[in-house]
Amino acid sequence: GDSVTQMEGPVTLSEEAFLTINCTYTATGYPSLFWYVQYPGEGLQLLLKATKADDKGSNKGFEATYRKETTSFHLEKGSVQVSDSAVYFCALSGFEGGSEKLVFGKGTKLTVNP
Amino acid sequence: ETGVTQSPTHLIKTRGQQVTLRCSSQSGHNTVSWYQQALGQGPQFIFQYYREEENGRGNFPPRFSGLQFPNYSSELNVNALELDDSALYLCASSGAGTGYTYEQYFGPGTRLTVT
């Protein structure tokens, strides 16, 4: 079945450092790809998405490019802030039992220190 | 525009009991999906409801059941609770049913603890 593998955490960075969180996927067909963020004690918020190969999703300084040839969707940010501390989930859309559902990776916890 | 809301926020139940969790979808959304997020894990798809019918199910036993109402709000029911059911339960709403990749908007979740 469809699956998502993302970089194990936790990741600890200093403010203004460069961030990369790796994500690769296995899927039949051509899924859409997403990054969600979860702040402590909260639900998931959609950070960015890409719906086809070579699309770049971007939001709040974060970017990710849909790479079909490497089945990857790595998350990057050029200069992280303390407020970016959260858990980041890579996900793909897939079909199961007739419905479209999200398949998530296990999450990567990011801590940014001042 | 009102976002996805869930109730209650936290719940503590005893093994063997039954629980009902509630979700109100975002305005204009007719599809509701439920996910279980165990501690330290990514969310796992439980099932989806579209126009009051179950529209797909993940690898969860029949003691997990649900409903969707005409106003598109939804309930998740879990019978015969087990310790492993302790998790954050997330509801997500989206704008259409099968065949479309609409963004799913998540609620804040219900934290269920089974003792």
Image: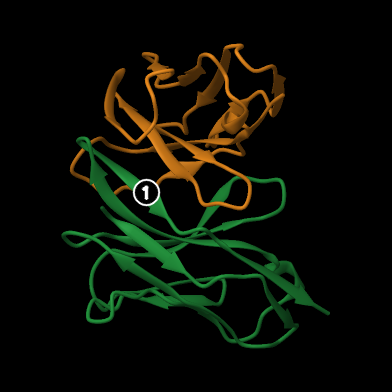
Chain colours: A green, B orange
Question: Which residue is pictured at 22% across the width and 81% down the height?
Answer: A69
Q: Where is residue A42 in the image (x, y as percent from the top left)?
A: 66, 46
Quarter placement of the C terminus of chain B = top right
For the residue pair B33 and B82, the one nearer the viewer reads as B82
Residue B90 shows up from this direction: yes
Q: Where is residue B65 in the image (x, y as percent from the top left)?
A: 41, 18
Please give the residue where the numbered disc 1 appears in the rendered image: A102
Question: Which residue is pictured at 51% across the width and 73% down the height?
Answer: A7
- Label count reads 1
What amino acid is labelled 1 in the image? Leu
Q: In this view, does A93 lie above or below A66?
A: above
| Chain letter for mark 1 | A
Determine the image quadrant of residue A114: bottom right
For the residue pair B95 and A91, the one nearer the viewer reads as A91
- State the SS at label 1: strand
Q: In this view, does B110 lie above or below A19?
A: above
Whether residue A78 sits left or right of residue A57 in the image: it is right
Residue B51 shows up from this direction: no
Q: Is residue A23 above or below residue B99?
A: below
Whether residue A41 sits left or right of residue B104 in the image: it is right
For the residue pair A54 and A113, the one nearer the viewer reads as A113
Question: Which residue is pictured at 70% across the width and 23% down the height?
Answer: B11
